[in-house]
Amino acid sequence: MAIALSKKGHFEWEEFRQELITAIAAWEEALSKDDSGWDYYQRWFLALEKVVVDSQLVSREEVEGRTTMLLKHLNAD
C-alpha cells in the first residue's frame, strides 16, 4: 500500500522512510529492543498513517473512526 501510494505521487518514498525511522526510534527511546511488545509492523503502520494524514489523503478523524469501527467489529465476534 505504501509503495503504491508513493508511486501514484501521494507522497515521496523518502518521506515514508523517514517517518518509519522516526517511529522506530521513538519506540526504542521509550522501551527496550528486547521488550516482547516490539512490533515492526505496528511502527510501519504508524509511519504510513502519519504520511497519509499529512498528505491529506485521509483525515485524522477518518482514521480514528475507521479504527473504532474495526475494533467494535472485532470485539463483537
Image (cartoon, helix red, strand yellow):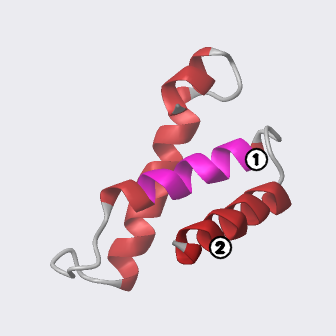
Which residue sits at x=79%, y=38%?
A: 57
Q: Is residue 44 magenta?
A: yes
Q: Is residue 8 magenta?
A: no
Residue found at the very far top of the displayed protein:
8
**Residues in magenta, as a range:** 43-53
In terms of secondary structure, what is the magenta stretch mainly? helix
What's the CA distance linking mark 1 and mark 2? 26 Å
Q: Residues within 10 Å of mark 2 (few under 14, many from 20)?
A: few
Q: Residues within 10 Å of mark 1 (few under 14, many from 20)?
A: few
- Amino acid at dot 2: Lys
- Which is nearer the eye, 19 or 66? 66
Name the residue that disc number 1 marks: 54
- Which is nearer the eye, 68 or 75? 75
- The image shows residue 50, relative to residue 77, as above or below, that is above
Which residue sits at x=15%, y=78%?
A: 34
Which residue sits at x=77%, y=39%?
A: 55
Report the side of 21 relative to 48 (left or right). Answer: left
Which residue sits at x=39%, y=65%?
A: 25
- Amino acid at dot 1: Asp
Report the side of 68 relative to 20 (left or right). Answer: right
Pointers 1 and 2 in contact (CB under 8 A)?
no
Name the residue that disc number 2 marks: 72
Q: Position of residue 68 (x, y in %)?
A: 70, 70
Q: Position of residue 71 (x, y in %)?
A: 60, 71
